[in-house]
Amino acid sequence: MLTSKGENYTIIGDKLTIESFMEIVRGKSKIKFNDKYKSRVLEARQMVEKWVNEGRIMYGVTTGFGANSTRTISSEEANKLQRNIIISHSTSVGKPMTEEEVRATMLMILQNAGSGYSGIRLNTLERYRDFLNLNLVPYAPKEGSVGYLSPEAHIALAIMGEGKMILDGKVTDSNQVLKKYNIENYELSYKEGLILVSGTTSVTGMAAIALYDIIKAVKTADIIGAMTLEVSRGTLRAYDERLMSVRGHKEQKESANNIRKILDDSEIAKANYNYRLQDALSVRCIPQLHGAVKKTLYDALETLEIEMNSCTDNPIIWGENGDGEAISGGNPDSSFIGLEMDSVAMAATMVAKMSERRNNRLIDGNLSENPWFLVNNPGLNSGLMIPQYTQAGLLNDMKMLSTSAVIDNIPTCGNQEDYVAMGYNSSKKAIAVAEKLEYILAIELLSAYQSYQYIDKNLKRSTVTDAIYNEISKTVPIMGEDIYLYPHIERLRELIHNGTILKIAEDFAGKIY
C-alpha cells in the first residue's frame, strides 16, 4: 500500500494477494502500475503490432473467433472484429453484478491482460485502471456465463462508451456517464476485444470475494463456538492439547488452540470443566470440523492466488526464442477455481450445519437447562424460536448451492467448445453461500449472547467473550420479552462480515488461525 496526498494506492505489477485484492475491490484503494507492469505490456504489444503488419495468422486477431477461427480477417477489418466481439458477446442477462463483483472482474482483467502475454495496449489497461480509481461501475448482467465472455463483454462495452453503467443507483448510458467525467469514448484495437472477454477473470474475481469472506466467517465461527461452549457449561476437556497431539492435522490443532486461547481466563469454563463427562458432538467436535474446513479453504486460497497472478488469455504472446509466437490453447478454462469453489461451498455448509445444531441446543430448554427459546414466560413469548427456522431455511439453500457446478457439461460454440468447465457458477454460488453462512453464525451468536443472562453472575466470562458481549450490548438488548429481532440479526451479521468480532478476539487472544 502506498499513500500519496492523503489517498491510498495499491501498486500492481508484482504478486497480488487476496488481502491486496480486497483493499482495491472493497476498500477502494486506488491503483498504480509499477514500471515492470508497464514494460511487459508495451513489449508484448510491440510484437502484436509487428506481426499484424507482417500479415501473420493469429487466432482472434486476424482470424474469426471460436468456431469461426478458420476464417481469415483482413488487417483493414481487424479493429472492427474486436468491436464485434464485444457487442456480440454482451448477452448475459438478469440482475447485474454487484459493485464489488464488477470491480473484482475489472481488477482481474488488469492482472490477466497486464501479465505481458496478452498484447493489449497500455492505454486500454489505463482506462480500466481509471474506471476503478474513479469507481465507475459498468452494468454487467450476472446470469448466463460459462466461465468467461458475457459479463466481461458488458464491462468492456461500458469502457468503450457504448454500454450501460450504474450511476447513483440507476442504470445509465455509458456515454452519458463518460461525458460527466469528461472522458471520451474509446475504440479497441486488434486483439483487445478478445483479451477483454477471455480468461478466468470474473470467475477468479468472484471467487476471491467469496473465499475472503468465508475464511473470515470460519475463523469467527471458532469464536462464536467458544462462546456457545462457555454458556452451555461445556467442558474444555475435548480441546486438550494432548488429545489434539495424537491426530496429525495442524488445522485441527490450531482450531482447538483458538478455543483454548479465547476461553483461557474464563471462570465459567473452569467452573464447568467437570460438569459433564463430554458434550454433544456439535460442541466438542469444533476443532475436527472447523479444522477440516480450514484445510479446504487454505488449499483453495493457494490455488486462487496462483490464478490471480496468472495469464489465462488465449492466445498468449510468447516473446522468447527469436521472433516470438502467438500460442493458442486452453488457459481460459476455469477448472482450477471451479473445483475449489465447489469444495469451498460444501465446506462452508458443513460449518453452517454445525452452527445451527449448536444454536438449537441453546434454545432447547431440555438441552440448555435454560428457559425455552431463551425468554421468560415462553408460550406468551416466542423468544428466539423463529431465528432457528431462519437458519433452517438458509441451510437448505446452502445445501442446494453445494451441488457441484463443474460436474456439468453443456457444449457451446458449434462444438468447438465441446467441454465447458462451468467454474463461473461455482464462484457465483460461493458468494451466496458466504452471505448465508454469516447469517447462520449471526443467529448462533444472538442465542449465545442471550444465554449469558442465565449464567451464574459470580463467574466471569473470558476477557475475549466479555469484550464481544460488551460490543454487542451497544446495539442489541437482552431480551426480557418478544422484540423485533430482524435488525439485531442484521447487526450481528455485519459485525461478522466487517471483521469486528474477529478483530476483538485477536486484540485480546492473538492471531486466530
Image: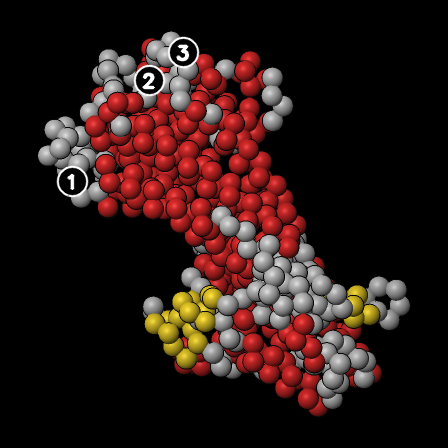
Q: Residue at x 56, y 80 (%)?
A: 88
* Image location of residue 212, percent across then percent down: 50, 46
Q: Residue at x 48, y 18 (%)?
A: 239
Secondary structure at badge 2 equals loop
In this view, the mark in front (1 or 3): 3
Residue 165 appears in which quarter of the rendering? bottom left
* Image location of residue 298, percent across then percent down: 58, 40
Q: Which mark is residue 28?
A: none
In this picture, residue 393 sits left or right of residue 164: left
Residue 243 appears in which quarter of the rendering? top right
- Residue that label 3 marks: 277
Compute the Cα span from label 2 to label 1: 26 Å
Q: Which mark is residue 483?
A: 1
Compute the Cα span from label 2 to label 3: 11 Å
* Image location of residue 310, percent across then percent down: 68, 56
Compared to 100, does 95 lie above or below?
below
Residue 181 appears in which quarter of the rendering? bottom left
- Residue that label 2 marks: 233
Label whose residue precedes the other's in the sequence (2 or 3) = 2
Label whose residue precedes the other's in the sequence (2 or 1) = 2
